[in-house]
Structures are given as C-alpha cells and as structure tokens.
Amino acid sequence: MMLKSHRNFHSVNGKRQILVVDDEAVNRELLGLMLSEDYDILYAEDGRQALELIRANAATLSLVLLDILMPELNGLELLTLLKQDPELAHLPVIVLTSEKSAEVRSLRLGASDFITKPYDLPEVIQARVRRTIELSEDTYIIQTTEHDELTGLYNKEYFYRYAEQFDRYHAAMAMDAVTLDINHFHLFNELYGRSFADEMLKTIADALRRALEGTGGIACRREADTFLLYAPHREEYDTMLAAILTALGEGGHRPRLRLGVYPCADKGIDIELRFDRAKLAGDTVRNNYARSIAYYDDSLHEKELYSEKLIAGMDQALRERQFQVYYQPKYDIRGERPVLRSAEALVRWNHPLFGRISPGRFIPLFEENGLIQKLDLYVWQEAARQVRRWREEYGTVIPVSVNVSRIDMHNPELLSIFRELMRSNQLSPGDYLLEITESAYAEDSERIIRTVEDLRALGFQVEMDDFGSGYSSLNMLSSLPIDALKLGIKFLQDLPSDPKSVRMLELMLDIARYLSVPVIAEGVEREDQLALLKRLGCDMIQGYYFSRPVPPEEFARFIEKEVSSC
Amino acid sequence: MLTMDTLCAFGADTEEGLGRCMNNEAFYLRLVGLAAKDGSYEALRAALDQGDLTAAFEAAHALKGVLGNLSLTALYTPVSELTELLRARREMDYAPLLSEILRRRDALLALCEEG
C-alpha cells in the first residue's frame, strides 16, 4: 500500500520533486539554486509547514532535505514522525546539519544521508541528492519485484537468495525448511472461485508472517498454493498450523493444509533441494486425514537416495541389459475355449545391487524426469524383435502391445520411430499394439488425439489403458480414436462379490459397446471373475488367472499350445 | 555598493561563496544582503539580554550556518566562537563578543546599503 503511493515518481513536468526544509532563507535559496535545474523544489520554513507539504505531495515527492534546528517542529521530530508513518516512511530524507552528534542521531532515526554546513560545492550536493533518490527508487523496484503480488511474501527467487544470505551470516544456526500446501487447492478454485481462493492464500500468508515475526524466519509463495518457510529450528509445528487454521476460520470452506518439515536442514546441500525434501515429506500426508505434518527423516532420505541411485543407474542398466521385457498373454474369452490373441510387454529390472525391482517403483520415477522415453524405446525395440522371432520360430504372429508414455506422445519423432521399428523387423503395424493411458488423453487431449489419429492412420491399433482411472467424460470418450478399452485392475478386485463393483463393470462394458470397441480386462486372477466377465460380455482377459508376465522363453509354451490346438 | 571586491575587503572567501552559488555573482551578493538583514542577530541579542542561553545558542547556530554557507569569514569566525561558547553554556560576559559581531554585521549592512 505504502509502495503504491510512491509509484508516481515524477511531478507534472517530468522532474523529480524535492522538498527543502530550512528556517533560513539563505540556506533554502542556496540549495534551490544548486538543485532547481534538475528538480522541482518545494520549500518549507519549519517542520510543521514541511509536514503539511509532505502529506499533500506524498505521491510525487522524491526526497526531503531537512534542517535539524528549526522553530515549531524541529528536524529530528519531523523525521521521527515520517518514519513512523507507513504512508511516508519510504520517503528518503537527507539531514542538513553542522552538528556531528545530530548526524548520528538522524541516521539512527532513518535519515538516508546528511549534508553538512557549510555546504560542499554544488556538484557534491547534487551527486548526493541524485544517489539518494536512485537508491530509494532502486529499493522500491526491488521491493516490488521481490514480492509475490498477491500475498506480499517474497517470490521464490528472492526467497532462495535471502535464505542463502541468512545462512552466510548465521552459519551455526539450525534452520528448518518447511513447505505448506493446501490439499486439493484446485478444487477450491473451481468450487468457490478464484477470488475466494486468493483470499485464502492471503490469509495464510498473513498468518505465516505473524508466526515468523521476530524469529528471523522468512516466507515465500513458491507457486499456486505452495508456501515455503525458512526459519530457525523449532521443536514443533502444531502451534503454527493451528494458528493458520484459526486464521482461516471455521466452516466447510476451510481447507486442509499439509506441512512438510525438513528440520535442521543440511546446509551443505542446495537451498532448493532442502525445500524439495520438505515437500517430499509433506506430500506423504497429502491424502492423510489423521496427519497434517510430516518430517523429512532418515527413512525418507534413504528412499530418496534409493531413487537417486535408480536414476543414476539407468543408462548403465540399458547398456548392460539389466532391463528384461516380460510378456503377459491376453486371451480372447468370447468362444468356448480361451484363445491367445496377443501379449503385453512389461519391463522388469534386475538391478545388480537391489535385485529385482518392481516397475511400480522405477517407472513413476522415470516418468517424472522424462527418462521413461529411453526405457520405452528399449522395450519397443525388444518387443518388436520378439514378435519377429516368434513369427520366425512358429510361423504365427502374436501381436504385442507396448506402453506409450504420456511424454512419448509429445515426441515429434514418434511416428518415424515406429515406422522404422516395423521396417527393420519386417512387421506390419497390425503386429504391434500401442497402449496409452486414459489420463494422458485428459491432460492435453487435442494434441494426444492428433497423435493417436496419426498412429492409427499408419495402421496401428491403440488401446486405452487404465480405463476408468482418468475421469474422462463420456462426451470426450465418444470422440476418442481408440480400438480397445483396457479396464484397470483396481475395481476388479472385489468382483464378483460386491454388487456395486458388478454394476460399475456393467456400466463400463456398456460404454465400450456404445463406443463399439472391445474390452480387455486386466488383473483377472480367479475363475469366478473370469466367469462374470464372460457373462457380461467382456472380450479379452489378461491376468494371473492365465499367467503372470513371463520371460519370452517361457511365453513360448503358450504359443506352442495355441499352435498345437489349431 | 556591495561588490565582490568590497565584500572581499570586508572579509569573505568570495571564491568559495561564489562557488556555492554556481558562480552567479548577482545571486551571491543578493544572499549576502539577505544574511546581513537576518533576524537572528536581533534574536541573539534579545536572548543574551535575557540570559536565555538556549535561545541564544539556537540563534547563533542558525547564523553560523548561513554565514558559513556564504563564506562570510569576518562574521563566521566570531559567530562560530560564540556558538561553541553557548553550546558549552559558559557562564561569562557575552557582551564584548556580541558587540563585535554586531559591529561587523553593521559594517556589512552599510556596504549593502551604500550607493
């Protein structure tokens, strides 16, 4: 607020405006002469007159030159008044004095500089005036750019810089890196509108400011609903959280918050990484209704180190063929006898240190940082070669489906990669199926749809993976270019005992029929599930009931069985 | 008439004073005229008559600032001396120093009003 009032640095004719306050006409005129070429000058003969002029010109004044010994309100009294007034405190003041003691006192009171009497040469005075105004305006610009406009907290760039600066001067002080997030913030935006959400953010910012007052701690809004705090270590954060929640008020609109605390953060690591760790901890309680505060500790650290090792080891793993592609059969269950139709290629990692690692552990990691593209390509190549080998060996084609990650869909080379794979293995696009997860469609649907259409135009069949997990609208589904729906594992768990799940399954199959595409049920483990799926008209089955994913040598027996039964 | 030469003869570092006035002679001489008529001399006299050392100090201090800025050495020197004595609140007879100051001020006034 106070800064906004100072936005208009210039007076009407484009010169900055200065107020000269001195009870002696000679002194006023001298300064006026020295400065009037570059500035608009206002004059006051005493402190009271000066205060009136300052109030009347607060928006345009750039500087006050202030004599100390004056009748009425003296200079030091006026200076004190100015610095206590939030609307005027920003206004720089240069004190005019011949008293050494007054210099120190006035600087303590907030004067920017002083000019001694008798005055120095005009050039010196002009330079000091110019410098003081520049400094004040630069400070203003820094203050406005270093703060988040909505909340008035630091923005992240300045926050990180100030945190580092704080560390330099308080090397021995134990500091906590803390993140604060609003659970499901986007819902508040959607349900109650932007201004409601903004108010919420401002309230949180104010509460954080109060909580940090006098501690030396600083806070920023990193993005959207993520706040960062860097503050001297405290034993608990429940009090702070309670204070913020109280500030947010009671009622149904009150959000749930989550705090991630990296206590006594390691100053040897990058400041941003310290907050990544805090956030990592905080996100572990994202959907936890019992706990709102989580601490980064050894176990999380171990997990993080583990993740880092996996990421670091990926290239070597590709070179050394530590990744193995397994195949899980998909059976057509429409007829009397289940018929092997295709297989899904699934990757396994035999890590030299950690042994066999679950894909659920490393795939999300690689998805996060884009490494998944390399792994996908590896699997695509392996799968294409395998289809060719089986064809050479058994004279029959078992189409294999491969996963195409969301990030792959943005690769401009995607089509040519698949074309080349087909060419080099002498396969046709019909021998190769592509699985794209439903949530990928939801994210950037138009672009994804275009790519899928291009792939289908080449002859590839596209299966929508994890159908039912991506919250697609029916309307959107009907416009999607797909050749099959794959039903996710999760809601099939309780089949056929849970009537709700059965009803859900019926709905999904209705949707598939409406879209005129076959349905592949994944994760089928038991006979009763199979029977139900078959009865309800599901087309294909994949799951432990038939086989877990197996290495290609083992998969061969399914093909042999199929070939012999033909 | 007050000129740079008469002012110099009176006792002023005119080069320095003129420098502060961006070498504008007319401006400088006009300010010297203003300084000669400064009300603080009367305030100083009245305060000393009443033995009000605080008020006397304030008046002397104000004069000192003006005289220093105009480099009117002949007046600045005794006024500075008086200011420091008053700052220390010395119990003494200020009359001789005051009358010397006023004598010089009168001389300056006379220069200003001549011709």
Image (cartoon, coloured by chain):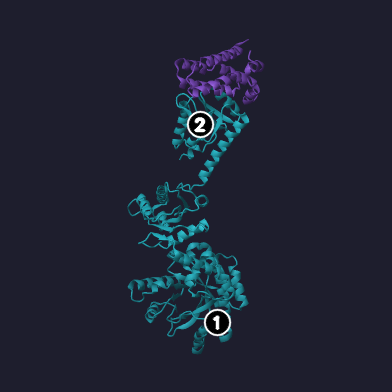
Chain colours: A cyan, B purple
Dot placed on the residue nearer the N-terminal end, 2 or 1: 2
Amino acid type for the residue under numbered disc 2? Ser
Q: Which chain carries label 1?
A: A
- Residue at the (46%, 22%) spot, across then down: B54
Of A413 and A104, which appears nearest the observer?
Answer: A104
Q: Mark 2 lies on which chain?
A: A
* Mark 2 surroundings: few (<14), some (14-19) or many (≥20) residues within 10 A: few
Expressed as whole percent of the image width and height from the top left, the position of residue A516 reads 45, 72
Tag 2 secondary structure:
helix
The reply, left or right, for residue B33 in relation to residue A528 is right
Q: Is A136 placed above or below A339 here?
A: above
Rendering quarter of residue A98:
top right
Q: Is residue B61 visible?
A: no
Q: Do the residues labelled 2 and 1 touch (CB within 8 Å)?
A: no
Q: How many marks?
A: 2
Q: Can residue A234 be seen in this view?
A: yes
Expressed as whole percent of the image width and height from the top left, the position of residue A73 reads 45, 27
Of A484 and A291, which appears nearest the observer?
Answer: A291
- Residue at the (58%, 70%) spot, across then down: A315
- Residue at the (38%, 59%) spot, across then down: A292
Label number found at residue A251: none
The reply, left or right, for residue A119 in relation to residue B46 is right
Label number found at residue A397: 1
In the picture of the structure, the residue carrying the numbered disc 2 is A101
Amino acid type for the residue under numbered disc 1? Val
